Amino acid sequence: MKKGSSLLWSICILVVLVVSCSSPANPTPVHALVATPNCDKGFSHLSIGETISVVDVSVPNRVRSTPHVDPGNIIGFISHGMHAKIVDGPVCADGLVFWKLEGTSVPTGTGWSAEGNGTIHWLVQYQP
């Protein structure tokens, strides 16, 4: 094999390795769950570690598997008077401020619920 041909093969192998390593087998989903502090533009009054309760707004708060409005990700509901601990967030998506909640009141133990819509708060700090 000629010297130039060997160099060309080396370059081809290097290109294949770079391309295959830079394209993950499982690409990051578009809706990556990333907390975005201050995304609520001053609306939120909650923080991680706090206990929340649901405000009586005539409809229970939806609990979702991901912090996005999608009928397919609803895993249950939390009703007025129920409370849970905030373990992650906030994530602002679809015009809502979402917090990840944990507790016995939360279906499956954990899930994302919207604090509010930028005007009305559906979740508030729990006051025993």
Image (cartoon, rainbow, N blue to C red):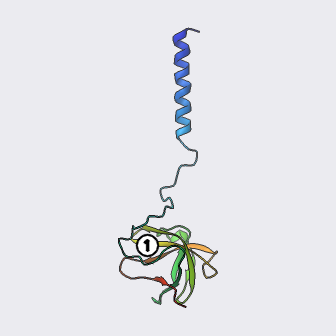
Q: Secondary structure at mark 1?
A: strand
Which residue type carries mark 1? Val
Q: Is residue 109 above or below residue 21?
A: below
Q: Quadrant of residue 49?
A: bottom right
Q: Nearer the viewer, residue 115 or 12?
A: 115
Residue 127: where, in percent of width, then height?
51, 89
Q: Nearer the viewer, residue 76 or 44?
A: 44
Q: Label 1, on which residue?
A: 97
Figure quadrant of the C terminus: bottom right
Residue 98: where, in percent of width, then height?
47, 72
> Measuring 47% from the left and 83% from the top, which residue is drawn there?
124
Q: Quadrant of residue 43?
A: bottom left
> Measuring 39% from the left and 68% from the top, which residue is drawn there?
38
Residue 20: where, in percent of width, then height?
56, 36
Q: Nearer the viewer, residue 126 or 69?
A: 126
Disc 1 residue crowd, few under 14, some 14–19, many 20+, Cα 10 Å: many
